[in-house]
Image: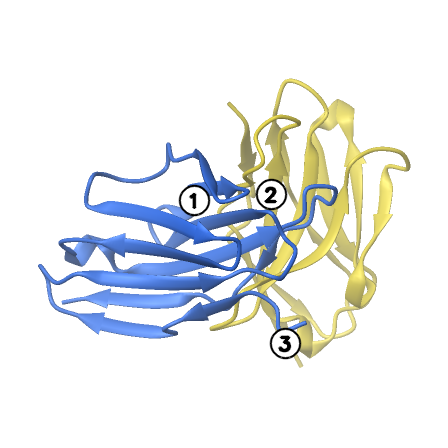
Chain colours: A yellow, B blue
Amino acid sequence: AQSVTQPDIHITVSEGASLELRCNYSYGATPYLFWYVQSPGQGLQLLLKYFSGDTLVQGIKGFEAEFKRSQSSFNLRKPSVHWSDAAEYFCAVRGTGRRALTFGSGTRLQVQP
Amino acid sequence: DAGVIQSPRHEVTEMGQEVTLRCKPISGHDYLFWYRQTMMRGLELLIYFNNNVPIDDSGMPEDRFSAKMPNASFSTLKIQPSEPRDSAVYFCASSFRDQETQYFGPGTRLLVL
């Protein structure tokens, strides 16, 4: 069975600082990987996704993520955080068969002025 | 496009009452997913449909929960009878078979007293 671990429950960064959110997955083959963002009281918005090819993927809002097979990781990064990035971030995995997503527990990002 | 539409956005009910949540997927999407989000269990799949047919209902908690998709533009998730532990945010999402992105609705926040 596939699973996703987001080891950081809560992260606080200063505005303008760089950001890295960690995600580790467990799956027998190469999965489909996603990062979603959820603002308070809102639904989930897709930031980026990885299926195959270039292991560094670019997403919306200046985010990027790198797939590292050897580490079973798919960490999300942003070089300079804006106050509007404060939200909860979810990493998700989907196997090549089952269509549903398995989500991590989420990382809540707080941005200090 | 209007995106995935869910109604109601908020529902407060008393234990034992029937609750019906509604979802309209994005036009042309042939996959529809119901997820539930709680503090204790995070985001988890309840059921998903393909071309109006339930494919995987392994996440449905118990017989009190039922979901239907009578046509391509409408789905319901029903809880009867409701219990306080059903309090959660219920998300509907849809996707198109040749794309991997699931688009989420704004969710229905359910409180069972």
Q: Are marks 3 and 1 in contact (CB under 8 Å)?
A: no
Is residue B22 left or right of B79 when viewed as pictured? right
Residue density around tag 2, few if under 14, some if 14–19, many if 20 or more, within 10 Å: many
CA distance for labels 1 and 2: 11 Å
- Looking at the figure, which quarter contains the N terminus of chain B? bottom right
Question: Residue A52, image x and y in percent?
Answer: 83, 33
Residue density around tag 1, few if under 14, some if 14–19, many if 20 or more, within 10 Å: many
At label 1, which amino acid type do we have?
Answer: Glu
Label 1 element class: strand
Residue at the spot 42% in from the left edge and 50% down from the top edge: B69
Q: Nearer the viewer, mark 3 or mark 2?
A: 2
- Do dots 3 and 2 share one subunit? yes
Please tell me which residue lies in front, B35 or A2: B35
Residue at numbered disc 2: A92
Residue at numbered disc 1: B44
Is residue B103 left or right of A52 when viewed as pictured? left
Question: Residue A88, image x and y in percent?
Answer: 56, 62
Question: Residue A8, image x and y in percent?
Answer: 55, 49
CA distance for labels 3 and 2: 27 Å
Given the current orientation, which residue lies at the most extreme left position? B16
Vertical comparison of A91 with B39: above or below: above
**Chain of the residue under the numbered disc 3 shown in the image:** A
Residue at the spot 55% in from the left edge and 43% down from the top edge: B51
Given the current orientation, which residue lies at the most extreme top position? A28
Please tell me which residue lies in front, A36 or A7: A36
CA distance for labels 3 and 1: 31 Å
**Chain of the residue under the numbered disc 1 shown in the image:** B
At label 2, which amino acid type do we have?
Answer: Ala
Which quadrant of the view contains residue B20? bottom left
Residue at numbered disc 3: A112
Please tell me which residue lies in front, B67 or A83: B67
At label 3, which amino acid type do we have?
Answer: Gln
